[in-house]
Image (cartoon, rainbow, N blue to C red):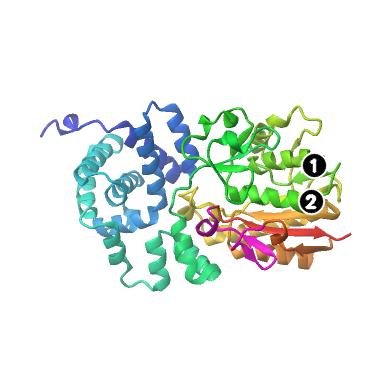
């Protein structure tokens, strides 16, 4: 037809938004949740279309590695030989066909329309042909076929939709329980809210109270619909993060008139909870953050306490070369930068973006920050080391190495003494898991500087 391009249907707004978001994630290393949230806020989509776009982006990012193998098999070519734009269109189509309740004909036709409009009419035929081959099998059938020739670990990684190196670490940590833990990373978590102590009550969150934190509640839907969140008297924070802050407050019980330090405070969730807990106990929080834009986010999270006599202080400083004197704080939280492997259910693109060398590169910084935290802590004071990663190199190995090398005398305390969470104890440490506790996979170590 001479006018086939003109006759093609205009792609729907939800798929166009999903494609633009995915392009930002794969081409610009954008965070899927932040990019999607920004675009949804600017778009005029109804609730149904917004939910469709959200699932399309999150699900495609989560299973990206699996879909790439399916697309390679269906197209009989390496994904590296496809243009990045076409590959993203095919990923979106594969998710609709294999993991969403979109009728096959509608999924293929709508994705071909998207390819023609966003990439060019020249790729419409290729998109149609590949997606029809993708649709010839279910996801389970594709996984079973692609698993032929894989060893046990490779098959586990494929059917749970993780890179091999992450599956290997889970097996090392959890043994036979690894598959359940990996599968839990594929379940969208219900948003978890948290009150700012002294500013709001859990009842105001209008949700189901969290199991282990007395300050949180799980509530489906938009957190901005809750008045306390809009007003800065509550926020969004995973229960595992809440428990990490609570561990410090409980371990430092009895302190009054002291300063507490959040050494790596951005974006401010733990700092906001700690600030309220500190004020209730007659202490003041100092929140330190290296990056100026993250320091501004911390200030925003703490705005509800601005009028208090013990209002928290925000400093934009390097935690490894701080301006305060040694021994300045009664309690220090070191929630250090990490690989984020414990939050894969919330950051679906991270599993394919991270590499083993990323973990290795972060370890020296983690050690320096923990050493700085111990230096900042007064004799007899408490340090809590936290990572949102279960990887052994970022957790127990860091703590053990620092305690063996530091000139600052300190001892481990059993985290179970302040956090009674069944199934979390790992020696003196605590390791939370999504499949066990419904939280991110947070690691918590509790240390006391010697008198």
Q: Nearer the viewer, residue 100 or 234?
A: 234
Q: Position of residue 249 (x, y in %)?
A: 74, 48
Instruction: Specify few, some or many for label 2: CA neighbours under 10 Å numbering under 14, 14-19, or 20 or more.
Output: many
Q: Position of residue 395 (x, y in %)?
A: 64, 61
How many marks the image carries: the answer is 2
Using the image, determine if residue 170 lies above or below residue 28: below
Q: Residue at x 33, y 59 (%)?
A: 69
Left or right of 260? Residue 420 is left
Residue 281: give its label.
1
Q: Secondary structure at mark 1?
A: loop
Q: Nearer the viewer, residue 46 or 145?
A: 46
The residue furthest left is 1
Q: Nearer the viewer, residue 387 or 372?
A: 387
Residue 194: give its label.
none
As for residue 421 lying within the magenta part, the answer is yes
The residue furthest front is 203
Using the image, determine if residue 96 lies above or below residue 141: above
* Among the 4 quarters of the image, the one containing residue 140: bottom left
Residue contact at pointers 1 and 2, CB within 8 angstroms: yes
* Among the 4 quarters of the image, the one containing residue 105: top left
Q: Secondary structure at mark 2?
A: loop
The quarter of the image holding the N terminus is top left
Instruction: Specify few, some or many for label 1: CA neighbours under 10 Å numbering under 14, 14-19, or 20 or more.
Output: some
Q: Which residue is mark 2?
A: 252
How far apart are the two marked residues, 1 and 2, measured between alpha carbons? 10 Å
Q: Residue at x 81, y 30 (%)?
A: 309
């Amino acid at each position: 037809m001479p006018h086939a391009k003109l006759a093609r249907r205009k792609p729907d707004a939800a798929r166009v938004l999903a494609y633009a978001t995915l392009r930002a994630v794969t081409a610009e290393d954008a965070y899927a949740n932040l990019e999607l949230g920004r675009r949804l806020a600017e778009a005029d989509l109804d609730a149904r279309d917004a939910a469709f776009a959200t699932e399309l982006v999150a699900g495609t990012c989560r299973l990206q590695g699996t879909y790439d193998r399916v697309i390679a098999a269906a197209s009989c070519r390496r994904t590296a030989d496809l243009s990045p734009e076409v590959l993203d269109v095919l990923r979106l189509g594969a998710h609709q066909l294999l993991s969403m309740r979109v009728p096959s004909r509608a999924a293929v036709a709508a994705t071909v329309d998207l390819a023609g409009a966003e990439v060019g009419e020249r790729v419409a035929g290729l998109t149609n042909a590949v997606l029809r081959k993708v649709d010839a099998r279910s996801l389970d059938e594709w996984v079973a076929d692609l698993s032929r020739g894989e060893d046990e670990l490779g098959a586990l990684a494929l059917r749970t939709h993780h890179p091999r190196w992450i599956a290997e670490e889970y097996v090392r940590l959890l043994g036979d329980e690894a598959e359940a833990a990996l599968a839990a990373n594929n379940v969208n978590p219900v948003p978890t809210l948290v009150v700012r102590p002294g500013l709001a009550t859990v009842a105001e969150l209008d949700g189901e109270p969290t199991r282990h934190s007395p300050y949180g509640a799980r509530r489906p839907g938009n957190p901005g619909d809750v008045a306390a969140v809009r007003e800065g008297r509550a926020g969004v924070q995973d229960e595992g993060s809440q428990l990490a802050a609570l561990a410090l407050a409980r371990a430092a019980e009895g302190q009054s008139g002291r300063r507490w330090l959040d050494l790596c405070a951005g974006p401010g969730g733990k700092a906001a909870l700690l600030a309220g807990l500190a004020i209730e106990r007659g202490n003041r929080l100092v929140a330190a953050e290296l990056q100026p834009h993250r320091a501004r986010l911390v200030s925003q999270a703490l705005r509800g306490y601005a009028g208090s006599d013990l209002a928290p202080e925000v400093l934009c400083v390097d935690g490894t070369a701080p301006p305060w004197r040694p021994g300045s704080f009664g309690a220090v939280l070191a929630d250090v930068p990490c690989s984020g492997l414990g939050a894969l259910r919330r950051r679906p693109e991270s599993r394919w973006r991270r590499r083993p060398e990323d973990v290795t590169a972060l370890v020296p910084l983690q050690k320096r920050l923990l050493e700085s935290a111990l230096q900042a802590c007064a004799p007899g004071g408490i340090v809590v080391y936290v990572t949102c990663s279960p990887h052994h190199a970022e957790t127990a190995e860091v703590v053990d190495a620092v305690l063996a090398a530091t000139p600052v005398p300190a001892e481990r305390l059993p985290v179970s003494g302040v956090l009674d969470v069944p199934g979390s104890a790992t020696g003196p440490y605590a390791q939370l898991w999504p499949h066990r506790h419904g939280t991110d996979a947070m690691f918590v170590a509790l240390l006391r500087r010697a008198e």
